[in-house]
């Protein structure tokens, strides 16, 4: 049995306390199907989130089979199924692939046979077996709602909470979904609660709870709803609520509720029933499920694949184009010298040539570095923010934030490595940068890409929307070039203030320090920017990577249900 005793929920808005829920007292037996209805803004979804453990009540207590969840801890992740208003399935995966992924993340199975049996059972229970091979992007609204319910059934939850799952559906689809939830509630160990605006299909519910302005004004059988509110049909209840104050209706309900509760069983005595829900898989199993799912989605997204290929091929070619053009200009500069003065001014000509070549090499390395920071931004700016609602739901279902982040870091590390290696090999093979060590050059390119990828991943974890994350990441890349000091020297004090935060500077400076000594002296002649030692560049870039991952961890730990 589920019991709520004197529940209050208050939030701070400005300088005032806003009471979203007050004096919520109710009890619901197992094997029960309950609707929560009421006008917009009355607290229906807020109440559901309190029961689910997403929000914490300000006062009062929630009990399950006599156990005080407020003091003794929430139900296990697998014991609660929560279906939010938004889609919790990946568009590029099929119905079956989404269910398989959810099982790997939330329900431990002992064998492949048991795994497949669970998949088939969930598909059959929700009537989706015939469309198991369809991608989510082509499903109708009703089919998507069925899939959302299917994803929650993989753990066989004892408490299934549904938030507006019939919203926006046509009457037939709505009735089918409500009938499905009714059938799911016939499990003697389970309670199904559905938040809805609709007052249709009330006959399928065992009880209806009516909220108004954060107070319970009715909780009883649907057949008594019209009589209690003195209306001809249930659809007139909302209009009737406006005729009395919330306290008037709430106080009236307190006087009459015991009469409506007489048919409900009392709180069970003795030990609570053992959970029949699934066991949450371990961290390693969740990691591989998340990692391989991310690659599958990556290769299904053709638009992103084309963009990645264009960046991977196009950016190194851009560097080469500018390199060849720069060398050609230098050659023309050398050839324009008067022939009869060649021997007399040979040393001066060599100095002019090498100074110009040093400037070109310095600028092109910075160009290479900036393009890799842009790659890093593209890698991760939307990585977490774009799927944040689904991740929040999966986190509620038992996915560990640290494992989720580790799967993202592993996925992005492969992209970063391939991008940086290709950039270094392609450009080096054609342009022949005069580096003393190709490995050091490559590692500095790898680190600047990794630094920007991890920092933008941190931004993605903190942003409220994917568009916001993308915009902030683009601004961050935009500041890399002017604040690096590699192209235009900054005032000395300003340079020292900004330099620690500019990944592009440290990669450029480290690569410059690794140039052949003959070229390095000419590079130092054409730039006023301080060139730190290579080892310091490595340390700073590693610190940037670590800081970005730390910010991302803080971000994924923080709830973002309003995203």
Image (cartoon, helix red, strand yellow):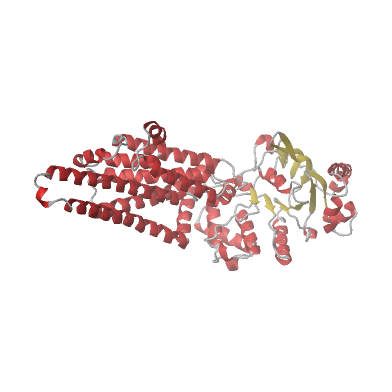
Q: Nearer the viewer, residue 336 or 204?
A: 336
Q: Nearer the viewer, residue 74 or 244?
A: 244
Q: Is residue 455 left or right of residue 395?
A: left
Q: Nearer the viewer, residue 188 or 418?
A: 418
Q: Tally the marks.
A: 0
Give the answer, above or below, for where 497 lies relative to 365.
above
Quarter of the N terminus within the rendering: top right
- Taking the view exactly as shown, the residue that stands out farthest to the bottom is 130
Q: Residue at x 50, y 55 (%)?
A: 111
Q: Is residue 119 left or right of residue 311?
A: right
Q: Is residue 461 visible?
A: yes
- Taking the view exactly as shown, the residue that stands out farthest to the top is 493
* Residue 421 position within the rendered picture, expressed as x and y whole percent measured from the top left: 32, 51
Q: What is the quadrant of residue 536 in the picture?
A: top left
Q: Residue at x 27, y 55 (%)?
A: 325
Q: What is the quadrant of residue 506 in the picture?
A: top left
* Residue 410 position within the rendered picture, expressed as x and y whole percent measured from the top left: 42, 48
* Residue 220 position within the rendered picture, expressed as x and y whole percent measured from the top left: 83, 50
Q: Residue at x 72, y 37 (%)?
A: 10
Q: Is residue 100 left or right of residue 169?
A: left
Q: Is residue 283 visible?
A: no
* Residue 289 position within the rendered picture, expressed as x and y whole percent measured from the top left: 49, 52
Give the answer, above or below, for where 340 lies relative to 496.
below
């Amino acid at each position: 049995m589920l019991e709520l005793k004197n529940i209050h929920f208050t939030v701070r808005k400005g300088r005032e306390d806003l009471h979203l829920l007050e004096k919520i007292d109710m009890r619901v037996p197992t094997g029960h199907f309950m609707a929560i209805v009421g006008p917009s803004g009355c607290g229906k979804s807020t109440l559901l989130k309190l029961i689910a453990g997403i929000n914490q009540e300000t006062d009062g207590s929630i009990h399950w089979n006599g156990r005080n969840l407020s003091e003794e801890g929430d139900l296990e992740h697998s014991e609660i199924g929560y279906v939010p208003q938004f889609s919790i399935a990946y568009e590029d995966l099929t119905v079956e692939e989404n269910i398989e992924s959810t099982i790997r993340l939330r329900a431990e199975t002992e064998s492949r046979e048991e795994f497949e049996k669970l998949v088939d059972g969930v598909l059959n229970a929700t009537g989706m077996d015939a469309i198991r091979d369809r991608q989510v992007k082509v499903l109708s609204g009703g089919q998507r709602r069925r899939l959302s319910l299917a994803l929650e059934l993989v753990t066989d939850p004892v408490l299934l909470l549904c938030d507006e799952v019939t919203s926006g559906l046509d009457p037939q689809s709505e009735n089918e979904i409500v009938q499905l939830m009714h059938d799911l509630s016939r499990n003697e160990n389970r309670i199904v609660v559905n938040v809805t605006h609709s007052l249709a299909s009330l006959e399928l519910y065992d009880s209806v709870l009516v909220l108004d302005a954060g107070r319970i004004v009715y909780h009883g059988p649907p057949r008594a709803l019209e009589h209690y509110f003195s209306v001809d049909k249930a659809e007139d209840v909302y209009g009737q609520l406006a005729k009395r104050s919330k306290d008037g209706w709430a106080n009236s309900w307190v006087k009459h509720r015991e009469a409506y509760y007489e048919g409900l069983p009392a709180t069970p005595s003795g030990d609570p029933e053992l959970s029949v829900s699934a066991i949450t898989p371990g961290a390693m199993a969740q990691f591989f499920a998340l990692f391989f799912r991310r690659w599958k989605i990556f290769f299904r997204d053709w638009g992103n694949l084309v963009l990645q290929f264009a960046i991977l091929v196009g950016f190194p070619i851009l560097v080469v184009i500018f390199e060849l053009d720069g060398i050609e200009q230098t050659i023309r500069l050398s050839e324009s010298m008067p022939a009869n003065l060649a021997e007399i001014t040979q040393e001066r000509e060599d100095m002019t040539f090498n100074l110009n070549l040093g400037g070109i090499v310095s600028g092109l390395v910075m160009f290479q570095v900036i393009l890799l920071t842009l790659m890093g931004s593209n890698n991760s700016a939307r990585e977490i923010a774009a799927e944040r609602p689904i991740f929040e739901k999966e986190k509620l279902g038992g996915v560990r934030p640290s494992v989720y982040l580790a799967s993202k870091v592993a996925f992005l590390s492969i992209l970063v490595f391939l991008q940086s290696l290709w950039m270094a090999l392609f450009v080096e093979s054609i342009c022949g940068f005069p580096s003393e060590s190709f490995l050091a050059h490559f590692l500095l390119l790898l680190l600047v890409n990794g630094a920007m990828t991890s920092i933008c991943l941190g931004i993605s974890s903190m942003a409220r929307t994917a568009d916001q994350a993308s915009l902030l990441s683009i601004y961050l890349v935009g500041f890399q070039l002017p604040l690096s000091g590699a192209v235009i020297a900054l005032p000395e004090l300003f340079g020292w203030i900004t330099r620690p935060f500019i990944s592009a500077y440290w990669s450029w400076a480290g690569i410059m320090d690794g140039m052949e000594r003959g070229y390095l002296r000419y590079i130092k002649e054409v730039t006023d920017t301080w060139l730190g030692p290579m080892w310091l560049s490595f340390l700073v870039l590693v610190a940037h990577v670590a800081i970005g991952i730390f910010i991302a961890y803080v971000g994924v730990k923080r709830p973002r249900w309003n995203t």
